[in-house]
Amino acid sequence: MHPASFAGHGKTGGVLAVGHRLYAWLNLQNGRWPDVDQALIWSDDGAATWKRSRWVFSRGRGRFKPATFLNFGKGFTGIPGEHRGHVYFYGQRQGETENTYLGRVPQDQLEDRRAYEFLSGFDGDKLQWSSDSGKAYPVFADARGTGDLTGVVYAPGLKRYLLSNFHKGPGQLGLFDGLNPWGPWTTVAYEEHWGGMRVDGEGLTCSFPQKWMSADGRTLWCIFSVYGPGARQGINAHDRLNVVKATLHLR
């Protein structure tokens, strides 16, 4: 057991390995959720100790806060050529649960807040990027709302990006696929009672590590976390590490 690197409270949502360095977004838990600041942390010793950015994505209604990273292969490898050189991340605006936004930063400048930019729209097929997070354009939307921990991973066997999130409680899970990190997205599955769990409670994360994908991308393993009374039903996955196999049938 290693001593804590920071005083106070905090939770991570998204984690990314770039080479041997680990990065994570840290919810500082310095207010009542979702009114909290979000910071970047990193580790060079396998998560034994961590350093934290001096800057934060500030709390406040309508402000963008990153929560997860777009993941590729081990150590940030296996990236399609057009997307190399940048780390991509996803998040929401505080108090707004319908839309998810996309940002990026050069992979060697993650600690520099000035290097961050946000997808702000399209000019034909050309992407528009802005350093102002207030101009961010939604890349995924669900009118029923989603949790803030949207997971996106590149599946090389399919040559597609897989996006997963919970739209309500632990039994309401959506899985989508797209040709790019910004979509457009098609629906793979949209479940209301996944795992026999009820709607009360909270679906937290659902991610598909590339390491656990078959060569053709059709067999996957999902790591997921759920919380609350509904999560105690069905497969009884409340507040623990859960792993489940997924098989995709292409049409």
Image: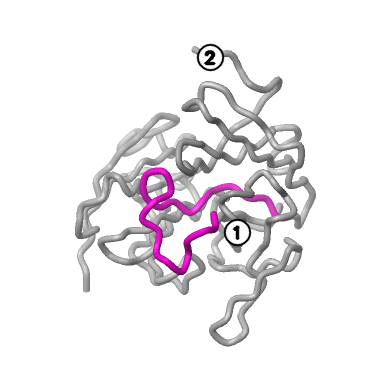
Let me know if residue 161 appears in the view. Answer: yes
Where 211 falls versus 28 (above or below)? below
Mark drawn on residue 104: 1
User: How many numbered marks does the figure carry?
Assistant: 2
x then y, percent, for residue 196: 32, 45
The residue labelled by disc 2 is 2
x then y, percent, for residue 97: 62, 57
**Which span of residues is magenta-colored?**
64-87
Residue lying furthest bottom:
124
x then y, percent, for residue 33: 69, 39
Q: In the rendered structure, which amino acid carries the disc numbered 2?
A: His
215 relative position to 65: left or right: left
Q: In the rendered structure, which amino acid carries the disc numbered 1?
A: Arg
Query: Image quarter for residue 163?
Result: bottom left
Secondary element under disc 2, as helix, strand or loop, is loop
190 relative position to 29: left or right: left
Mark drawn on residue 206: none
Residue at screen point 77% across, 45% down: 59
Let me know if residue 166 appears in the view. Answer: no
